[in-house]
Image (tube, rainbow, N blue to C red):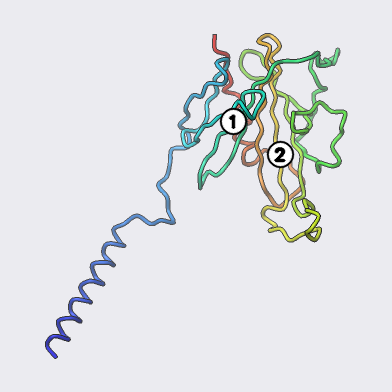
Amino acid sequence: MQTTHVLVLILILSVCCVSASQRSAPSASKPLKRSDDKLKQVELDGKYTIQVPNYFSAGRVDDKIAAVPIYVFNAEQPHYTTIHVSVSPYSGEIPINPQTGKFVPPATGHLICELNDSANPLTLAADDGTPLTRYFTIQDDRDVYYGCAVVDNAYECSAHAQCPHPVALASRYTTRYAFTVFDKKNNSTIEFTGSNDGPSKTITKFEGDGKLLRYTIVPSLRSIR
């Protein structure tokens, strides 16, 4: 009987120790807060540099797979994202509007994306087909042409799946963003692409990767002199 009491006492002490240990350990559901405003510099093909958040990991697609340098930037939760940047030769002559001196007429109003199947095929477009319909200017007087296109994931169906298929409302639509710099002086075209999932097909402001590219990464582009 005395042995039984001793065993019960040991078990109680063990439970108390485990509980205390759990209370003193950081909660797994609350990751340590990172300093989002800190940036690090990344070199692109020995020609340019950009600034990316320091929580990004950077990689480059194997040259055996890609014909031009392509860089991939990934971030884990809670900042999960994937952004691609490519540097390709400036090729051909891109038509310039004689009235504006720009590659495309400047658009006014808010950023508005269309469903991908209704995009104008004659519009200047990024390599992935995203239309470039607006522009802004960054340092060194470079124009950045940008645009976005929306994909309805409910209708991205395979031959062996029902269509439309069930998709969570929060991620039904994927907005693809593209930003392109035509640097004729340095014989290069720099393209930035990213995406964002959301519940709406009407986009009037930058979200997700688009926001990060528009206000942080793309404006940081610099030539290596």
Q: Secondary structure at mark 1?
A: loop
- Counting labels gives 2
Q: Is residue 67 above or below residue 155?
A: above
Q: Quadrant of residue 96?
A: top right
**Amino acid type assigned to the residue bearing label 2 in the image:** Arg
Tell me the residue that label 2 is attached to.
176
Residue 107 position, x and y percent, is: 80, 27
Instruction: Categorize mark 2 by other alpha carbons within 10 Å: few (<14), some (14-19), many (20+).
Output: many
Q: Residue furthest left?
A: 2
Q: Is residue 150 above or below residue 15?
A: above
Q: Residue furthest front?
A: 64
Q: Depth check: 162 or 179 in front?
A: 162
- Real-space CA distance between mark 2 and mark 1, rounded to the nearest whole angstrom: 20 Å
**Amino acid type assigned to the residue bearing label 1 in the image:** Val
Q: Quadrant of the C terminus?
A: top right
Tell me the residue that label 1 is attached to.
61
